[in-house]
Amino acid sequence: MKDFRKLQVWEKAHRLTLDVYRATQSFPKVEVYGLTSQMRRAASSIPANIAEGCGRSGDAELARFSQIAMGSASELEYHLLLARDLEYLDQPNYERLANQVVEVKRMLTSFIQTLKADR
């Protein structure tokens, strides 16, 4: 069992989640159960799946949950694009969050490859 708090990819994903929560605070109230909820769920799913994988037995399980986290990151990537196109996010905030998601996805890819190579 690994301590997820010591993983850089978890730290970055956690920071991204906090930033998504802050960014969605200003979304229209009509979106509270729509896009706001979807973005927050997708964002929080990334570090949550990394944490869950760390609590499982072995690197194979951690790799599997990291792959699920990757799917959530891709989902968030689309939701950010949608929020920008709906003009809920301005361009600077969109770019900042989108860059964070891309960085987390790169880190997850590298992490998953390392876990699979260690087997």
Image: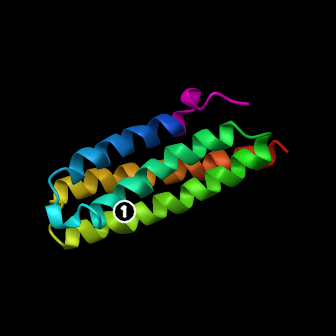
Name the residue beneath numbered marker 1. Answer: 38
- Residue extent of the magenta highlight: 1-9
- Mark 1: give few (<14), some (14-19) or many (20+) Cα within 10 Å: some
Is 7 contained in the magenta span? Answer: yes
- Residue 28 magenta-highlighted: no
Image quarter hosting the N terminus: top right
Q: Secondary structure at mark 1?
A: helix
Total numbered labels placed on residues in the image: 1
Q: Residue at x 49, y 51 (%)?
A: 45
Q: In the rendered view, tell whether residue 85 sits above or below residue 98.
A: below
Residue type beneath disc 1: Gln
The answer to which image quadrant residue 71 occupies is: bottom right
Q: Position of residue 110 (x, y in %)?
A: 62, 48
At 58% from the left and 48% from the top, the residue drawn is 49
In the image, is 63 to the left or to the right of 57? left
Where, by quadrant of the figure, is residue 91 drawn?
bottom left
Please name whichever residue, 23 or 37, is drawn nearer the observer in this view of the structure: 37
Model colouring: rainbow
Residue 86 is situated, as x and y percent measured from the top left of the image, at 18, 72
* Relative image position of residue 38 (x, y in whole percent): 36, 62
Q: Quadrant of residue 118?
A: top right
- Residue 63's x, y, as percent? 70, 50
**Lateral position of residue 4 relative to residue 16, left or right:** right
Please identify the residue farthest to the right as the structure is shown: 119
Q: Is 50 on the left or on the right of 54, as rendered?
A: left
User: In the rendered view of the protein, which quadrant contains the C terminus?
Assistant: top right
